[in-house]
Amino acid sequence: MSKERVSRRQFLSYTLTGVGGFMAAGMLMPMVRFAVDPVLKAEAGGDFIATPKKVSELTDEPVRVDFTFKQKDAWYESEVTESAWVYKDGDKIIALSPVCKHLGCTVNWNSDKEHPEQFFCPCHYGRYTKDGTNIPGTPPLHPLDVYPYKEKDGFLYLGKAKPRKEA
Ligand code: FES
């Protein structure tokens, strides 16, 4: 039979270490969880967002479509409204970001009388052809970003705008 005894000092040491460790874990776990929480969440970037635009209403003339969605930046949730210039090209739908690739102003369709049927950025006179290609000699150096799209229940759904390959 073992006669090993635990001294009072050892007992106190074990107990305090155990209790201290337990308390430290209890304090650290929420902090770690808090720090990595956004990383653990699935990225919402792949989601398609419903727009109020019926696909059947689209023509070959670009129209501005505004759509609103909830965005969560870390722990802050906000409502964001974005826009797209959308038109039909045969069977395809083209949905372009209105954000100018020069310095981020908003481009408009067909608003420059001297250059009709183009996207025009009033900030520094940037211009793009109808398919979003930047026109050489104007400030933007890249084409407008393109939204992936889906049709659901007759409505247009848009994904996250992505840069287009260089023209
Ligand atoms: S921001 Fe559009 S041309 Fe400069």
Image (tube, grey):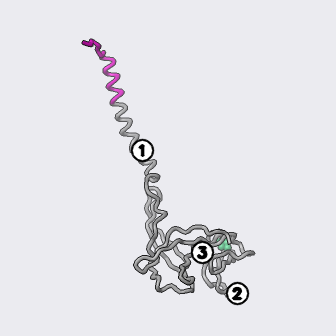
Question: Looking at the picture, which amino acid does disc 1 mark?
Answer: Met
- Residue drawn 70% across the image and 87% down it: 114
Q: Residues within 10 Å of mark 3 (few under 14, many from 20)?
A: some
Q: Classify mark 2: helix, strand or loop.
A: loop
Q: Classify mark 3: helix, strand or loop.
A: loop
Q: Mark 1 and mark 2: span between their CA atoms?
A: 59 Å
- Residue drawn 35% across the image and 22% down it: 13
Relative image position of residue 20 (x, y in whole percent): 36, 31
Q: Which residue is mark 2?
A: 114
Relative image position of residue 146 (x, y in whole percent): 57, 72
Q: Is residue 29 left or right of residue 109?
A: left
Task: Please name the predominant secondary structure of the magenta segment in the image.
Answer: helix
Rendered view: 45 above or below 125: above
Label 3 CB-ligand 1 distance < 8 A: no
Q: Classify mark 1: helix, strand or loop.
A: helix
Q: Sequence-wise, which precedes: disc 3 or disc 1?
A: 1
Relative image position of residue 60 (x, y in whole percent): 56, 86
- Whether tag 3 and tag 1 are in contact, CB under 8 A, the answer is no
- Residue drawn 48% across the image and 64% down it: 46
Q: Which residue is mark 1?
A: 31
Q: Which residue is mark 3?
A: 106
Task: Report the front residue among 60 and 13.
Answer: 60
Q: Sequence-wise, which precedes: disc 3 or disc 2?
A: 3
Question: Looking at the picture, which amino acid does disc 2 mark?
Answer: Glu
Label 2 CB-ligand 1 distance < 8 A: no
- Residue drawn 56% across the image and 84% down it: 90
Which residues lie in the magenta part? Answer: 1-18
> Splitting the image into 4 quarters, where does residue 25 fall?
top left
Quarter, ligand 1: bottom right
Q: Mark 3 and mark 1: span between their CA atoms?
A: 41 Å
**Which quadrant does the N terminus fall into?**
top left
